[in-house]
Amino acid sequence: MSGTAYSVVEPSTASKTIAGFLVILYAFITMVPLLWIVLTGFKSPPDSISYPPKVFFEPTLEGYCNLFTTRSRQTREYVESLGPPEGICDEITRGRQMVIVGESNYWPRFQNSLIIAFGSTILAVSLGTLTAYGFSRFKVPLADDLLFFILSTRMMPPIAVAVPIYLMYRKLGLSDTALGMILLYTAVNVSLAVWLLKGFIDEIPREYEEAAMIDGYTRLQSFWKVVLPQATTGIAATAIFCLIFAWNEYAFAVLLTSGSAQTAPPFIPTIIGEGGLDWPAVAAGTTLFVIPILVFTILLRKQLLRGITFGAVRK
């Protein structure tokens, strides 16, 4: 009997085509809002609120200039009495009958986001790795109950603990401080880190460590030189998830920070222009805010893909 044999594992050409089309469609739908934000950052204020929305427009850097500067409206006579514009931002600002009076607070808030997000991620992943190793390699009494308790801390909505944390931080002097935000985000993220990393460490054979200790390594040395290199993919994947939470967190940042330790998420919506929100400046700030997390994810994309599929296929 003649015929064509089909594999039960290898997908057919039609299924590959349909799957590829759906992936491309999903990616396009997902990227449209981000692309629109990027384009809005290069629009003028009137173009940003025009109806119907403008897809084709004359690009300008006014949004980015407004994002990094504070301006004051002056009379036409005063603006004309000034010397030549000092840079493109000064020229754009004078075209609106305003002058630049100083720098905005966006860059300090952006720096706060970098310090708090990366600091809490490093601390959460470090503590999570050690804790996950302990649960994976040692007999911990009531281990399942403890792991569930650790995970349950992440199930709690932020608003449920916001007021107690605010009162505690005010009493301890941690309110509106980078240290306080790093400790808080670490406490929230460490539960996720423990659960993710325990699964990765469980997949690393114990025999590797035992062989290392037979060769004279201590437990700590075997952990540092044997376990950690093999858990790199899991650590990278966990770091990305922890960083995304700390980078985008809004509720705690609004409640616990207002000045020196305020991060970018609560600051960006407060950018005010003439007659309301300066949408090009808001879009410009959002675009710049997305770049670090995007670069970090791209740099670790290989480790992230390996980490997600680690242990999925057993040999």
Image: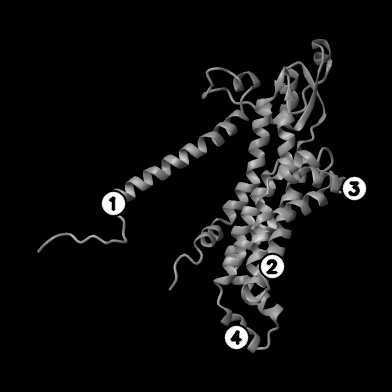
The answer to whether 209 is drawn above or below residue 247 in the figure is below
Q: Is residue 40 or residue 187 the one in the foreground?
A: 187
Residue at image point 75% right, 35% down = 267
Q: Which residue carries the number 2 mark?
A: 131
Q: Which residue is mark 1?
A: 13
Q: Quadrant of the N terminus?
A: bottom left
**Cα gap from disc 3 to disc 4, whole angstroms:** 51 Å
Q: Earlier in the sequence, mark 3 or mark 4?
A: 3
Real-space CA distance between mark 3 and mark 1, rounded to the nearest whole angstrom:
65 Å
- Looking at marks 3 and 1 on the same chain, the residue that comes earlier in the sequence is marked by 1
Q: Quadrant of the C terminus?
A: bottom left
Q: Residue at x 52, y 62 (%)?
A: 306
Q: Marks 2/4: CA distance?
A: 22 Å
Specify the amino acid type for callout 1.
Thr
Element at badge 4? Answer: helix
Q: Secondary structure at mark 3?
A: helix
Mark 1 or mark 2, whichever is nearer to me = 2
* 265 to the left or right of 207: right
The residue under label 4 is: 211
Q: Residues within 10 Å of mark 1 (few under 14, many from 20)?
A: few
Marker disc for residue 171: 3
> Above or below — where is 27 with respect to 273?
below
Label pair 4/1, CB-CB below 8 angstroms: no
Q: Which amino acid type is shown beneath numbered disc 4?
A: Ala
